Amino acid sequence: MQIATTRKQLPPLPQPPNNGRGRLEVDLTYEAPDTVETRLGSIPADYESWTGWEHTERIYFRDGHKEASNPYGRSQTIWRAQPTYNQDGTARLKEITRTVVAEPKSELTTPLIWGAGGGLIGGLAGAVIGLATGTDPGVGAVIGGGVGAVAGGVWGYHDANTDRVRLEWQEANITEKDLVGYIHDVDEDRRYVCHGYGKDRHCRWETDDYEHDFRPIIESTVVGTYHRPVVVHYKD
């Protein structure tokens, strides 16, 4: 199999106005992999059981057999987009048009997001300090939350104010997927159960059931490359 690449002369890309400070929305046409949804095989469907133990295991298929089901005979089919090929064995490319939006971080919403995170961290730190020093942890949480929110907001504004964007071509891999096995996660589902009333009330954790979750193990093989336009954030 030959490795296809689009290392030909790439056209210049339009750029956001105001030296990367403005917003750009543009339709770009370029060559991308021609793919088709392909069935790779199947893995067991999720299920619940009354007995078991918590653990995780990786199970690999053997002898090219890529089908599996759970104890009840149910399975889930795994599909992935697979590249198509030219007669010479190279990955086939097709022309596509995609709308690309390049926009720097907002000076309105970014400080709010940073402020909320700073307030949460500051509140927790203030409560811990309050407990450690013997003062009211509620007061510490309020003060710490306020200080954290202000600091986070200031840093958030600085982050947004210095954020710039540009469009550039980046090389990306064309990959072929192969289902090689699956991951089996078993989690104990517990509930807190209470019996009786008053002094005779007793509570304990009881196992409700065991949840069996399955995820595919998929390996990728590079069969070619292509160039795509991407939005890059950078600092002024």
Image (cartoon, rainbow, N blue to C red):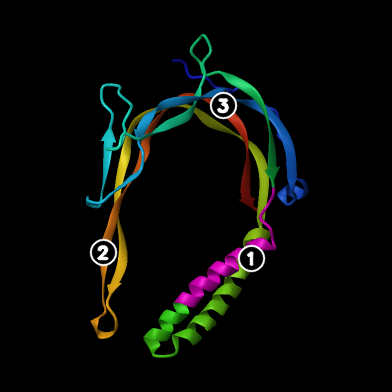
Q: Earlier in the sequence, mark 2 or mark 1?
A: 1
Q: Residue 83 appears at what percent x and percent y?
A: 51, 22
User: Which residue bears the numbered disc 3?
Assistant: 226
Q: How many marks?
A: 3
In front of the other: 89 or 75: 75
Q: Circle 3 sits in a helix, a strand or a loop, which is it? A: strand
Pointer 3: residues within 10 angstroms few (<14), some, or many (20+)?
many
Report the residue marked by disc 2: 206
First in sequence, mark 3 or 1: give its number.
1
At horizontal 58% and vertical 65% (from top left) the residue drawn is: 114
Secondary structure mainly formed by the magenta segment: helix
Where is residue 133 drawn, in percent x and y? Answer: 39, 88
Q: Nearer the viewer, mark 2 or mark 1?
A: 2
167 relative to 62, above or below: below
The quarter of the displayed image where residue 153 is located: bottom right
Q: x, y (%) of residue 121?
A: 49, 71
Task: Report the disc number at residue 111.
Answer: 1
Classify 10 Å Cα crowding around label 2: few (below 14), some (14-19), many (20 and above): few
CA gap, disc 3 to disc 2? 55 Å
**For residue 181, side relative to residue 123 (left or right):** left
Q: Dot 1 lies on which element?
A: helix
Tell me, yes or no, whether the highlighted magenta stretch contains residue 99.
no
- Give the CA distance from mark 2 to mark 1: 45 Å
Is label 2 in a helix, a strand or a loop?
strand
Corner quadrant of residue 194: bottom left
Q: Which of the image's four quarters has the N terminus? A: top left
- Residue range in magenta is 103-124
Residue at 50% across, 87% down = 139
Q: Are marks 3 and 1 in contact (CB under 8 Å)?
A: no
Density class for disc 1 (Cα within 10 Å; few <14, some 14-19, many ≥20) is: many
